Image (cartoon, helix red, strand yellow):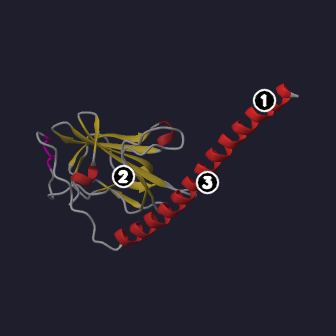
Amino acid sequence: HRRRSQALGRNAMSESDRALALGERARDLVEQLDSGDAARATAAGLATLPGPLPRPLAPGTVAPRRSEGVYRLPVRGRLVTGLDEISDSGVRSRGLTFAVAAAAPVVAPAAGVVRYARAFRDYGVIVIIDHADGWTTLVTGLGRAGVARGQRVAAGAPIGVAGGGEDPRVTVELRRRGRPMDIAALLG
């Protein structure tokens, strides 16, 4: 009976510790719910503020040459993925992805020379524009290109149309010597 009593005592202490841990976890969950409400209120307040000012370029970075003074987004749409976001499959985004209307017009974000304009794997039709000095733009998700390799394009010139289907998406990546760059710093 003594051994049985000791075993039951140990089990009781273990269950007591478990109950304390569950109580702590419940308290943490309630705090998270409260902070979620506060975060939603803050987000709603931030949504009413005017847009942010573009970030200055990092020291030593040279902006790409632009014929109209600013780098622009190549398509109108709803931003669904931002730079460096990690997808459900664990892949880090190297650009911005927009949900767009089927066959939406896509324009050159800055002046340059088209280096590639055709279908590529699962990305649909892609267009790569060389802006000189190591700056390039990659635009994926087009249904068809309106430019050809070697063609010179001005900023804002049509380069194609978005794909069709149920949920067309266009991705734009700005690169400096092959490395993804933050487009937000160059938008005017």
Comparing labels 2 and 1, the label whose residue is closer to the camera: 1
Q: Earlier in the sequence, mark 2 or mark 3?
A: 3
Residue tagged 2: 146
Q: Residue at the spot x=37%, y=43% of the render?
A: 84
Disc 1/disc 3 C-alpha distance (Å): 30 Å
Give above or below for 122 relative to 73: above
**Label 1: how many residues lie within 10 Å, few (<14), some (14-19) or many (20+)?**
few
> The C terminus appears in which quarter of the rendering?
bottom left
Percent across and percent down for residue 53 are 21, 62
Disc 2/disc 3 C-alpha distance (Å): 58 Å
Q: Earlier in the sequence, mark 1 or mark 3?
A: 1
Disc 2/disc 1 C-alpha distance (Å): 82 Å
Judged from this view, the residue extending furthest toward the top is 3
Comparing labels 2 and 3, the label whose residue is closer to the camera: 3
Dominant secondary-structure state across the stretch colored magenta: loop
Percent across and percent down for residue 110 are 22, 52
Percent across and percent down for residue 62 are 12, 43
The amino acid beneath tag 3 is Ala
Image: magenta residue range? 61-65
Q: Nearer the viewer, residue 74 or 51?
A: 51
Judged from this view, the residue extending furthest toward the bottom is 48
Percent across and percent down for residue 143 are 47, 51
In the rendered image, residue 143 lying in the magenta stretch gets the answer no
Would you say 80 lies left or right of 110 here? right
Element type where label 1 sits in the image: helix
**Label 2: how many residues lie within 10 Å, few (<14), some (14-19) or many (20+)?**
some
Q: Nearer the viewer, residue 3 or 114?
A: 3
Element type where label 3 sits in the image: helix
Residue tagged 1: 6
The amino acid beneath tag 2 is Gly
Would you say 44 lies left or right of 72 here? right
Residue tagged 3: 26
